[in-house]
Amino acid sequence: MTSPLRRIGLRVIALGYLIVILVAPLALVFYRTFEDGIGPAWDALSTPETVNAFKLTLIITAIAVPLNTIFGIACGLAIVRRRFRGKGVVNALVDLPLALSPVVVGLSLFLLYGLDGWFGWLGDHGIQILFSLPAMVIATIFVSLPFVAREVVPTLREIGDEQEQAARTLGANSRQTFWRITLPAIRWAVIYGVVLTTARCLGEYGAVAVVSGRLQGETETATLRVEERYESFDLAGAYAISIVLALIAVLVLVAMTAIKPKEEAA
Amino acid sequence: MSTVDVASRPVRSVKLQSERASTALSLGLVTTYLTLIVGLPIAALVFESLNGGWAGFWEAVSSPEAVGALKLTLWTSIAVALLNAVLGTVTAWVLVRDSFRGKTLVNAIIDLPFALPTIVAGLTLLALYGPQSPVGINVAFTTTSIVLAMLFVTLPFVVRTVQPVLLELDQELEQAAKSLGASNWQTFRRVVFPNVLPGILSGVALAFAKAVGEFGSLVIITGNLPYKTQVSSVFIFSRIESGDRAGAAAVAVVLLAISFALLLSIGAIRHYATRHDRD
């Protein structure tokens, strides 16, 4: 069909582009991290501040992912199966985090929960939101909100509601229909969405940078720690944390590659 | 479909009532969650930006530094969107129509920029294209570094919107065009291109939105020099740090408006592209 020369030309452009933008920089950081063996990288990772940063990232992810999963399923069902006023607004707000700058997200929360903000009064009652865990969790939930819903919606559309209606006709109530019919049918879409959400939560930087206050060892996540190490001229430390985050990203890719065919087959 | 739904509901009123209650409950939870997480913060942002009235908003948005940052953001994002349109389409084409060893692996790493934290992206680009570059290329703290970082984080969008369209595109159409005497270029322009155009456009719009809002990968590599490498998101961040909330909020509202406009146009593109699928 296409001449071999043209085909190889296009292949060289595509692969060259990927190598220049993506593969070469990552390979170099990988090489730099382990240049002097695994020892220095391990030392950099085992400082208490870095360990704490990873713990905090995991805690935030462990709260945000389940909440967004439940929301994503409920929201997908509402968008596809229900008619209600304001559906357009719901649709727009769910998609917004995909297109909005994380810094704008952080600023919005900063303004809402700041001292003069609408929810500033919470601070007078001893409920600390800004510059502590709650604000970081809310920021992370905001940026990772769409992924489960966006995966579930097309799958729900595709499977239709005939099976659900059959179940209803046979006397199942809405809870039974959901657990026995709907959820099993969309399970791979949900799992795929959970993987995407997890990746987004672990990697969030901008929104959390604004609302965290960046207290070392207290409100510093793994991504914030990378920047802090870089600013303190500890490149080895920054690289070591980056490599761990990159390895997690690779795990995410493996999961995505394994799940996608199942989702499409379902 | 929903009329069928209503008609087939059991008529027993107790059951109907409890069903209605559970529907209302789940709808209520969805809207409450959305309002708390997304709606209220956005409202607070818009409110803050208009705190000093329309004049205050305009003054903050039209300050030379804010305008400079916004201009830089827009033209780098446009450049990135155009580069994505070409290189993303070529990459998608190669992944669908070409075959070579390791294609599965290449296909998988397309999503890496999505899974990789943006701050790590910036750090890795600085390692290869910064002051300590082993290949002697140093673009750190220049406009080129902005484009490079934006290209990194937007890489998956066009590839992933064009790829499924190319996969579904019937190759017989192209063969028919060829057998009727069309050249390679004519076949691409008249047969392939019109089919993949909606995919390219929605991918480009997503990439543009991501580029306009990008922050993490730019923090390290651009050095945050006002007028020179300070894009809007970085400008907003530095205004928050210096306590200028009105200035930060005003520019943030401009980015918010751009995001909404892009989402609307993506919706319109999808609507247009699927017009034949609907009855």
Image (cartoon, grey):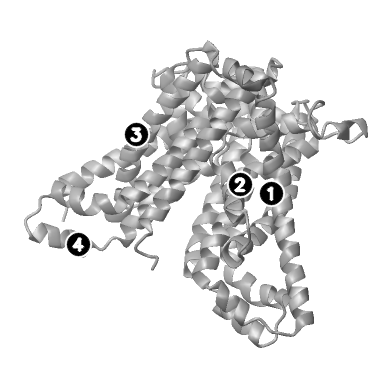
**Along the line of sight, the residue nearer the viewer: A253 or A81:** A81
Residue at disc 1, secondary structure: helix
- Closer to the N terminus: mark 4 or mark 3? 3
Circles 1 and 2 on the same chain: no
For marks 4 and 3, give the CA distance.
28 Å
For marks 1 and 4, give the CA distance.
45 Å
Disc 1 to disc 4: CB gap under 8 Å? no
What residue is drawn where x is 30% and y is 39%? B86
The amino acid type of the residue labelled 4 equals Leu
Circles 4 and 3 on the same chain: yes
Residue at disc 2, secondary structure: helix
Name the spot of residue B235 as percent of width and height, x first. 58, 20
Disc 1 to disc 2: CB gap under 8 Å? yes
Residue B26 in view: yes
The residue carrying mark 4 is B173
Residue at disc 3, secondary structure: helix
Quarter of image, res B136? top left
Q: Residue furthest front?
A: B54
Name the spot of residue A250 as percent of width and height, x first. 54, 46
